[in-house]
Each structure stands twice: as structure tokens, then as C-alpha cells.
Image (cartoon, rainbow, N blue to C red):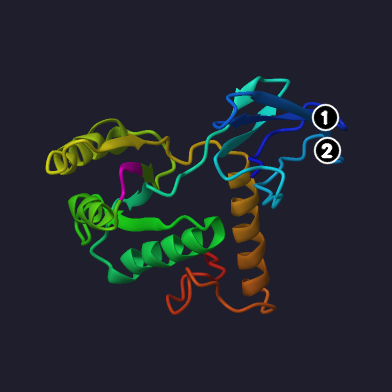
Amino acid sequence: MMHSATTPSQFPVTWFSRSDSASGKSVRIHHRLPFPISVKLQRIMMKSSSFPTNSSLSLVNEERGRVEHKVGEHDAVIIVDHGSRRQESNLMLNEFVAMFKARTGYQIVEPAHMELAKPSINDAFRLCMQKGAKRVIISPFFLSPGRHWLQDIPALVADASKEHSGISYIITAPLGLHELMVDVMNDRIKHCLTHVAGDADECSVCAGTGKCRLYQNQ
């Protein structure tokens, strides 16, 4: 499998490092990727009989010298939002988790709410253990690194992990200033403008609320 990397030039040279546990030898294979500058390569599934199943395959960006690691079969992902007293908001997290799992192919992905709703972080952590996880990746469904990310979520995860000895976990960064957030926001803006112009239905977020409309002071 190749992992995402930012292309450093118009036609970047990348290389694969294959470590064969049987021979102990490392083979370096150069490959030129025909993608234009600034394109971010998404995970590309590669099926090749030339790579044995006991080999490790990594894509290295020669510009940055960084190896990108992936979620493994014994890893679990918990996607955590704040939680709401509004059930419709909580159900949206379930829908996102289903989308995330379908798109990534990760085997164990669970939703959790920091407070106000179930399942809690503790509930999700326990469910991941029941499904055979050995490592848990907690991904906050938050925009900014505020107090919840700095204090509340780490405290709740640490408490949940106490019931399961020998299990490691990591709390990833929130969404933050990722460049793809620009595309997400612009898509929302364009859809709402199209809706108020009468050329599109409400999106799944606004559906039934009547909130997506043009306001004008008299």
C-alpha cells in the first residue's frame, strides 16, 4: 500500500522500502509518480505478488524524508465530539463514523460523546477492547485545540484506559487549519446559496430546521 504524500516537484521521485523478514534484506525501489505539483496523493491500493505478505511497505517523501504510518488491523479509532442534548446532533456523529469507516476501510471505528450523551468515551473504549483492539486512536471531532482537547478528553481517555491493562492509546490533533477545511466550508457556502436561490434542497444538516434561508431587516 502507498500512503499519502505531498509531491515536492512536478514529477517527484519516490521510493519504496521493502523489508523482508525472511532474508533480512532491504530493497529500495525508485518510482516516478506522474502527478502534477501540489497534488496530494491519496492512499493507492497496490496488489502485487512480488511483495510477500510478511514485508512492510512504506512510501517515503524524499523532500521531507517522512514515513507515514497507517492504522493497523489491531487498531481502533474513536471519533469524539462534544455531545448534545439535541438528539439529531448526536445522530450526525453516527452518520459521520459510518462514512469514515466505509471510506477508510478501518475495521474498528466507534463514536463517542465527551458529555451529555451516550456512548461515552468509556463506553466506546470498552467496545473497542471487546472487538480485539490493542491500540486505540482517539480523534477529536473538534475544530480548535481548546480546553476540551487539552484537558477534558485526555482525562476521560486516561480514566477509560485504566480498566484495560497493556493497552496503548493516542489522542490526535483536532481538525484545525487543515487545507481541506477550506473546501468543506466553501462547499457549504455554495450549497446554501443555491438553496436560498431555490435551485437545491436543504442539505442533510439543515433539513427540516428551516434555518437555511435569507434574512433581511426591514
Residue range in magenta is 133-137
How many numbered marks have been drawn onto this rendered protein structure?
A: 2
Q: Residue farthest to the left?
A: 163
Badge number at residue 202: none
Residue at image point 25% right, 39% down = 153
Q: Residue farthest to the front?
A: 23
Left or right, residue 74 beside residue 123: right
Q: Give percent across and percent down for residue 181.
A: 58, 46
Q: What's under tag 2, amino acid-wise? A: Leu
Q: Nearer the viewer, residue 86 or 153?
A: 153
Q: Secondary structure at mark 1?
A: loop
Q: Secondary structure at mark 2?
A: loop
Q: Which residue is mark 1?
A: 12
Q: What's under tag 1, amino acid-wise? A: Pro
Q: Nearer the viewer, residue 213 or 105?
A: 105
Q: Nearer the viewer, residue 119 or 16?
A: 16
Q: Give percent across and percent down for residue 191.
A: 64, 66
- For the residues labelled 1 and 2, say whether their Cβ atoms are less than 8 Å apart: yes
Residue at image point 83% right, 38% down = 33
Compute the Cα span from label 1 to label 2: 6 Å
Residue 206 versus residue 17 in the image, above or below: below
Looking at the magenta stretch, what is its main secondary structure?
strand
Q: Which residue is mark 2?
A: 33
Residue at image point 63% right, 73% down = 195
Binning the other alpha carbons within 10 Å of mark 1 as few (below 14), some (14 to 19) or many (20 upward) gives some
Q: Nearer the viewer, residue 180 or 31?
A: 31
